[in-house]
Image: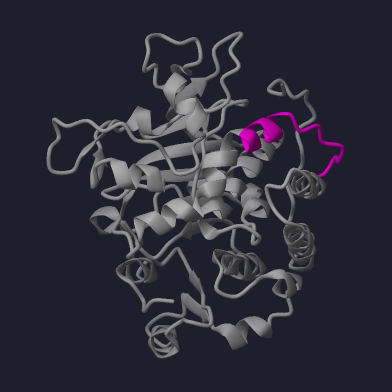
């Protein structure tokens, strides 16, 4: 929609990345056509006419003026050989003019012997804990007043779990335990950067809490053990090749809900592949495009009402398929039957799977081991 931003210019300069920008009917075609003509051909802008010519099955099921137009770019990237994808928004600038997107190199994502120091969060023995607020591990504080700590949670975190996981009324058995471990980087399926300055929080926090913020604690990585969930977004997220099947965004819900629903059903299936959702210390600052807080709040109604329920639904899933594409379809049908999404998303995800097969994506194999995390 907007003209090329500072982030686009940052990534354009990186020799190990190509940029795919998916236009919409409101995009500024002149500015983007100039960007297409600049320098090395590492930036592709797909305008409305370009997209219609691609022949993807998802085009029939993807509305205009929706966050889910990103799905067209995801298929395009995979078709053109992407081994990893950095899913981002144009207002999440790389900190300190980083020369490359952290943790995105092929060497990093596919080196089977490379181990990283990770803070691993686990569900306590005998606990029914299902979610963990990773923002706590990074210690939010006010941007200009480091002595002022902030209690903050991510957009899409189940609000009914906040009180107990924060131990607001004394010690609780439902607080994740921590341990420092070495973890194989090849098992990082999704790496989400926490964002400094204007982190991804919901409309309730924006209307009642303090911004901007920075995260003072810097564990390089925080990982969640199987059975423990945390929402992640589509703003600063590195996806490894084995998780690219999980890029598709639901199109029947608001964009403020779409990436959060994706995060919950995808991380559940990552466990079946031996992959992990991992959070990283901030390598982006979000300088947010103009939003109306009350509009954000209203758009996020499903998050406030249903986030806890979608966690319960995904933790209780009993899959029948022996293939990850089949399990993705099962999950989507299950979510439709429970009114988290609409029928249009069932058709879109079926088309998505068809397109991935058509462009030659190599779906990863499932683990042959029992699911210890199921309720």
Residue 234 appearing in the image: no
Residue 103 appearing in the image: yes
Residue drawn at x 35%, y 55% is: 293
Horizontal relation, residue 281 to residue 105: left or right: left
276 above or below 197? Answer: above
Q: Give the x, y percent position of residue 110.
A: 56, 45
Camera-side residue of 351 and 173 = 173
Res 69 → quadrant:
bottom right
Camera-side residue of 250 and 295 = 295
Magenta span of residues = 309-323
Horizontal relation, residue 153 to residue 302: left or right: left
Residue drawn at x 46%, y 65% is: 17
Quarter of the rendering occupied by the N terminus: bottom left
Quarter of the rendering occupied by the C terminus: top right
Residue drawn at x 50%, y 50% is: 300
Q: Is residue 36 magenta?
A: no
Res 331 → quadrant:
top right
Q: Give the x, y percent position of residue 166.
A: 39, 21
Residue drawn at x 42%, y 88% is: 37
Camera-side residue of 1 and 304 = 304
Coloration of the structure image:
one colour
Q: How many marks?
A: 0
Q: Give the x, y percent position of residue 137.
A: 36, 28
99 above or below 181? Answer: below
């Amino acid at each position: 929609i907007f003209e090329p931003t500072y982030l686009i210019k940052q990534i354009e300069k990186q020799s190990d990345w190509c940029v795919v920008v998916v236009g919409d009917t409101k995009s500024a075609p002149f500015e983007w056509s100039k960007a297409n003509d600049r320098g090395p051909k590492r930036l592709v802008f797909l305008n409305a006419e370009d997209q219609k010519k691609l022949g993807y099955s998802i085009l029939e099921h993807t509305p205009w003026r929706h966050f889910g137009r990103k799905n067209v770019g995801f298929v395009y990237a995979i078709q053109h050989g992407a081994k990893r994808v950095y899913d981002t928004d144009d207002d999440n600038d790389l900190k300190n003019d980083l020369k490359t997107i952290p943790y995105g190199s092929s060497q990093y994502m596919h080196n089977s012997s490379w181990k990283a120091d990770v803070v691993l969060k686990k569900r306590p023995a005998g606990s029914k804990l299902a979610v963990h607020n990773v923002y706590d591990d990074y210690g939010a504080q006010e941007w200009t007043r480091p002595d002022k700590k902030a209690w903050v949670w991510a957009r899409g975190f189940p609000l009914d779990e906040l009180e107990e996981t924060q131990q607001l009324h004394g010690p609780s058995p439902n607080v994740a335990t921590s341990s420092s471990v070495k973890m194989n980087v090849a098992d990082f399926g999704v790496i989400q950067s926490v964002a400094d300055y204007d982190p991804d929080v919901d409309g309730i926090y924006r209307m009642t809490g303090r911004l901007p913020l920075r995260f003072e604690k810097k564990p390089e990585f925080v990982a969640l053990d199987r059975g423990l969930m945390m929402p992640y977004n589509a703003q600063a997220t590195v996806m490894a090749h084995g998780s690219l099947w999980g890029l598709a965004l639901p199109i029947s819900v608001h964009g403020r809900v779409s990436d959060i629903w994706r995060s919950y059903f995808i991380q559940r299936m990552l466990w079946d592949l031996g992959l992990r959702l991992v959070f990283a210390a901030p390598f982006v600052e979000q300088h947010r495009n103009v939003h109306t807080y009350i509009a954000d709040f209203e758009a996020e109604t499903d998050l406030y009402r249903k986030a806890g329920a979608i966690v319960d639904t995904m933790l209780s899933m009993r899959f029948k398929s022996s293939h990850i594409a089949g399990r993705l379809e099962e999950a989507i049908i299950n979510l439709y039957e429970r009114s988290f999404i609409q029928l249009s998303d069932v058709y879109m995800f079926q088309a998505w799977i068809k397109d991935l097969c058509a462009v030659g994506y190599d779906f990863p194999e499932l683990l042959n081991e029992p699911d210890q995390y199921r309720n």
